[in-house]
Every structure is written in C-alpha cells, then in structure tokens.
Image (spheres, grey):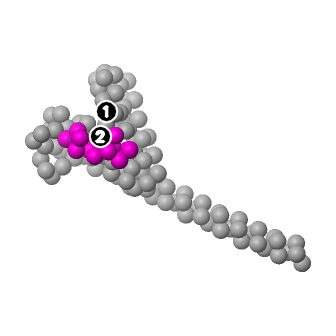
Amino acid sequence: MRLCICFVLLSIILYGSADSLIVEGGRFVWDALGGARDMYRAYRDMREANYKGADKYFHARGNYDAAKRGPGGAWAARVISDAREKWQSDVSGRGAEDTRADQEANRWGRSGGDPNRYRPAGLPSKY
C-alpha cells in the first residue's frame, strides 16, 4: 500500500512539473512570436521614416520592445539581429564598423536601455 501511495504522489509531482514546463514553453514561444512582430514593426517604421541617421534608434527600439516580452522575446530579438547583421556584413558590404555599431544598439535595447539614446534630432515623434 505504501508503494502505491508513493507512486501516486510521485506521479502528481511529475505531472505538475510537466504541466509547468509545457506552460513555460508555450509562454516562451508566444513571447518569441511577439518579439519577432516587434522587430518587424521597428523595421517597417525604419523603412517608412526613411530618416538619415535613425538606423541605430530603430535597432535599439526593436530589441527593447521584443525583450520586454520576456526570455522568448529577447531570444527572438537576438536571433533576428544576429542574422541581419551577418547578412549585412557578408552581402551588403557596409563594413565591420557599421555592424559593430548596429550590434551595440541591439544589445543596448535588449538589456533594457532607453532606445532614445540613439534617437536622431528631428525624427518625427510618431516614431
């Protein structure tokens, strides 16, 4: 009988842990999708603004918004930022200095730093 009770208690503990992992995994995925949307919105706004010198601001803002969602959002921001910068340095030929500055802005935003640090004077308040 004791063995049966121990088995039931162990089953309840394991079930509770598995349920928690599923919920946390689902939250991570949900946050990652939201973070990807945040990154896309920052990219879209950057293209729409077409404002000279605003690139770093939009990098920081996209990463900041995504990371505010939690670990999944921060993960999505890091993956998207790193992929974009790899492509940019390999294909576009903008140079290592520009990639380094972009990555600095990306890290600043992901770490919770205010994106307005990179905001150029005159950028419309809509952004």
> Farthest left residue?
122
As drawn, is 107 to the left or to the right of 120? right
**Disc assigned to residue 19:** none
Give the vertical position of 118 relative to 35 (above or below): above
Q: State the residue at coordinates (31%, 33%).
A: 102
As drawn, is 107 to the left or to the right of 12? left
Amino acid found under the numbered disc labelled 1: Asp
Number of numbered discs on residues = 2
Relative depth, front residue between 91 and 112: 112
Q: Tell me which corner region of the image, top left, top right, bottom left or bottom right, holds residue 105.
A: top left
The verdict on residue 90 being magenta is no
Give the vertical position of 97 relative to 30 (above or below): above
Relative depth, front residue between 57 and 41: 57
**Disc assigned to residue 102:** 1
Residue that carries the numbered disc 2 in the rendered image: 59
Relative depth, front residue between 32 and 14: 14
Q: State the residue at coordinates (34%, 33%).
A: 104
Whole-percent x, y for residue 122 in the image: 10, 41
| Mark 2 or 1, nearer chain start | 2
The verdict on residue 117 being magenta is yes
The CA distance from mark 2 to mark 1 is 7 Å
Q: Residues within 10 Å of mark 2 (few under 14, many from 20)?
A: many
Q: Residues within 10 Å of mark 1 (few under 14, many from 20)?
A: many
Residue segment shown in magenta: 108-119
Whole-percent x, y for residue 33 in the image: 42, 54
| Marks 2 and 1 close (CB-CB < 8 Å) | yes
As drawn, is 46 to the left or to the right of 13? left
Q: Secondary structure at mark 1?
A: helix
